[in-house]
Amino acid sequence: MRKPFVAGNWKMNTDSQTGVQLAERIAAGSVEAAGRTVTVAVCPPFVYLQAVTRALASSSIAVGAQDMYSEPDGAFTGEISSSMLKDVGCTYCLCGHSERRHVIGETDELINKKVTAAINGGLLPILCVGELLSEREASRTNDVVTRQLEEGLAALGDEKLSAVTIAYEPVWAIGTGITATPDQAQEVHDFIRKLIGRMYGDQLAAEIRILYGGSVKPGNAAELMGCEDIDGLLVGGASLKGDDFLAIIQAAV
Ligand code: PGA
């Protein structure tokens, strides 16, 4: 049985006060669900990680980073390592989010190094994959997702794969208000699980959690969670509103 997983990606939003308030609101409202029946995590900006982990210390809500660097330490101005994230209480780290791929220009090779470094540093990576609208329209969704997974997971053995969560986030659905229909999402999730099965065997494919992300809202969360291969939700905009995020967690219970 795969435990549902709801993660909030705050992106470059909040400040030291509103970030802590949001974390406290989520902790207060999700006492029942979080930890026992649903894994819940929030991913604040780096500079608020410590304040948010403190605010969530007595809750079962985990904290993740939105990115990290692939090297453990050294002369990498502006970068943050896995051990620094561990040090401030992070459990998870997003790797290869579409905005890092398409705005910042990260390659599959770099994302693979980050996934590997996250696991080596004791973090649980959430590897994000997904196609552009032009790629979907050219019927290339499966090819794109295959490349992103094969290259993103390259050289990762079975044991390391168990640390990984996958998030399927079609780029055309992120922040646009356009959600993939449950059928569209399920089709890709099923494809991803079968691909993981070919790469790692049926057992690991059955165990790995595959989240859907892209304009998830309280109004569509339950329907998406009703799909067989959708194990959770990666939420951007709606995770910035405490009540909306709580409603989404509730839909995953
Ligand atoms: P969105 O973002 O929910 O605002 O579409 C999702 C994401 O980028 O993870």
Image (cartoon, rainbow, N blue to C red):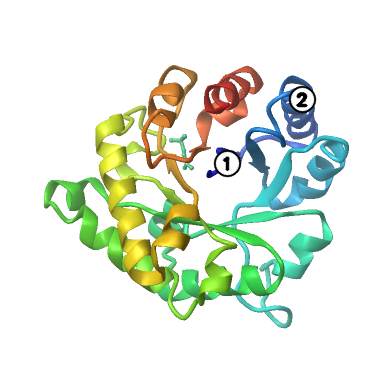
Q: Earlier in the sequence, mark 1 or mark 2?
A: 1
Q: Nearer the viewer, residue 102 or 166?
A: 166
Above or below, 217 against 229 in this view is: above
Q: Residue 86 in the image: x percent, y percent?
A: 78, 62
Residue 227 to residue 251: above or below: below
Q: 10 Å neighbourhood of mark 2: few (<14), some, or many (≥20)?
A: few
Displayed quadrant of residue 41: top right
Q: Is residue 107 visible?
A: no
Q: Residues within 10 Å of mark 1 (few under 14, many from 20)?
A: some
The label nearer to you, 1 versus 2, is 1
Q: Is residue 201 left or right of residue 5?
A: left
| For residue 226, side relative to residue 163 (left or right) | left
Residue identifier under label 1: 3
Tell me the SS state at disc 1: loop
Q: Residue at x 40, y 28 (%)?
A: 226
Instruction: Look at the picture and state if 146 lies above or below 53.
Output: below
Which of the labelled discs sits on residue 31, or is there none?
2
